[in-house]
Structures are given as C-alpha cells and as structure tokens.
Image: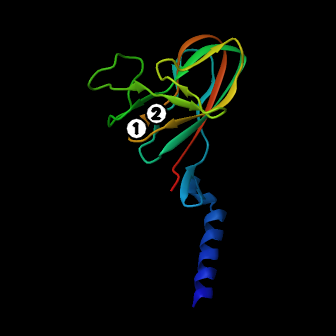
C-alpha cells in the first residue's frame, strides 16, 4: 500500500513541475512566488508596483542600478484594505509608513525613513523586508538625480 502512495506522490510532483507550478515554487514546506519586476529601468521619482503581501512572511528585493545612480529608495507599507498612494499626503484613508529593511550582505538594518541612499555609485544588492501583518508594499524612489533603477522581488514564507 505504501508503494502506491509513493507512486501517486511522484506523479503529483511530476505534474506540478510539468505545469510550471502555476507561478508558485514549493521549497521544503514553504511557498515562494516567481520573481516579480516592480521597477523596470526607472529614471525619475516614482513608486513601483505594490505587492499584496499579506500572505507572505518575507519579501526579498534585488536592487540593481546603472548610470551612476544618485537616488533614495524607500519601501512604503500599509495595512489598509486598498494600496496607498504615495503621491498624496498620508491620512486615515491613505495610511502608510516607510518600513525598515535589512541589507542581506551584512544583516544591517536600514531605517525606513532614511532608505537606501545612492550617491553616484551604482549598486547591486539584496534586501529583505519583514512583512508580518503588512498588506501592501512597494519600492519608491523619493529623490532622484541620476541613473536607472531596476527592482525585482520574490515573496515567500518559511513554513
């Protein structure tokens, strides 16, 4: 009887892999999304694509810049039902806060109100945002003087 279970599990795993996992890859017991481009060659102040993050414990962002980037990147997060607008003032109906991030190179915390400050030197880095109980999150270029910013994200949990 046990051999039938193994065969059925093997067939299910094969079919899931064959179908591409429907955009979700299983790693151990956890779930990881496909890579999501949230900023693509941005050269101005802008807010990237908001991710509905309430079902994920963590989001890792890959930040890659070119052209001697001189900009500040922050990560607004919100618990509101709808994604916030970073182009209008914060209020009861447009609530968000700039979230602390962790640089995965050395584990250092970067204050949310400070963000990642690029001063004419290009950067390629991975950062993590702890999204516990945060519903919406996006990257935002709050100041811009030069260069191009590309940001991708992957969301997941460690279950």
Q: Quadrant of residue 9?
A: bottom right
Left or right of 6, for residue 78:
left
Q: Residue at x 52, y 27 (%)?
A: 139
Which one is closest to the eye, mark 2 or mark 1? 1
How many numbered marks, from 0 up? Answer: 2
* Other-residue count near label 2 (Cα within 10 Å), few / some / many at <14 / 14–19 / ≥20: many
For residue 47, above or below residue 71:
below
For residue 72, above or below residue 134:
above
- Residue farthest toward the top in the current orientation of the protein: 145
Q: Quadrant of residue 81?
A: top left
- Say if mark 2 contacts mark 1, CB within 8 Å: yes
* Other-residue count near label 1 (Cα within 10 Å), few / some / many at <14 / 14–19 / ≥20: some
* Residue tagged 2: 137
Q: Position of residue 23 (x, y in %)?
A: 58, 52
Distance in Å between CA atoms under marks 2 and 1:
7 Å
Q: Quadrant of residue 136?
A: top left
Q: Position of residue 77 (x, y in %)?
A: 42, 30
Q: Position of residue 19 (x, y in %)?
A: 62, 62
Give the label on residue 134, or none: 1
Q: Position of residue 32 (x, y in %)?
A: 57, 51
**Tag 1 secondary structure:** loop
Give the label on residue 89, or none: none
Q: Nearer the viewer, residue 93 or 120?
A: 120
Left or right of 61, for residue 137:
left
Q: Nearer the viewer, residue 91 or 123?
A: 123
**Tag 2 secondary structure:** strand
């Amino acid at each position: 009887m046990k051999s039938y279970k193994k065969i059925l599990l093997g067939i299910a795993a094969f079919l899931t892999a064959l179908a591409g996992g429907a955009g979700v890859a299983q790693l151990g017991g956890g779930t990881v999304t496909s890579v999501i481009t949230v900023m693509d060659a941005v050269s101005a102040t802008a807010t990237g694509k908001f991710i509905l993050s309430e079902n994920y414990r963590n989001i890792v962002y890959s930040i890659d810049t070119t052209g001697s980037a001189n900009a500040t990147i922050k990560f607004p997060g919100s618990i509101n039902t709808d994604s916030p607008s970073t182009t209008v003032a914060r209020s009861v109906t447009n609530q968000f806060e700039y979230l602390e991030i962790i640089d995965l190179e050395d584990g250092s915390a970067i204050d949310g109100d400070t963000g990642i400050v690029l001063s004419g030197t290009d950067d390629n880095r991975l950062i993590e945002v702890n999204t516990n109980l945060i519903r919406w999150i996006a990257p935002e270029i709050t100041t811009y003087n030069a260069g191009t910013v590309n940001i991708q994200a992957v969301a997941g949990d460690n279950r």
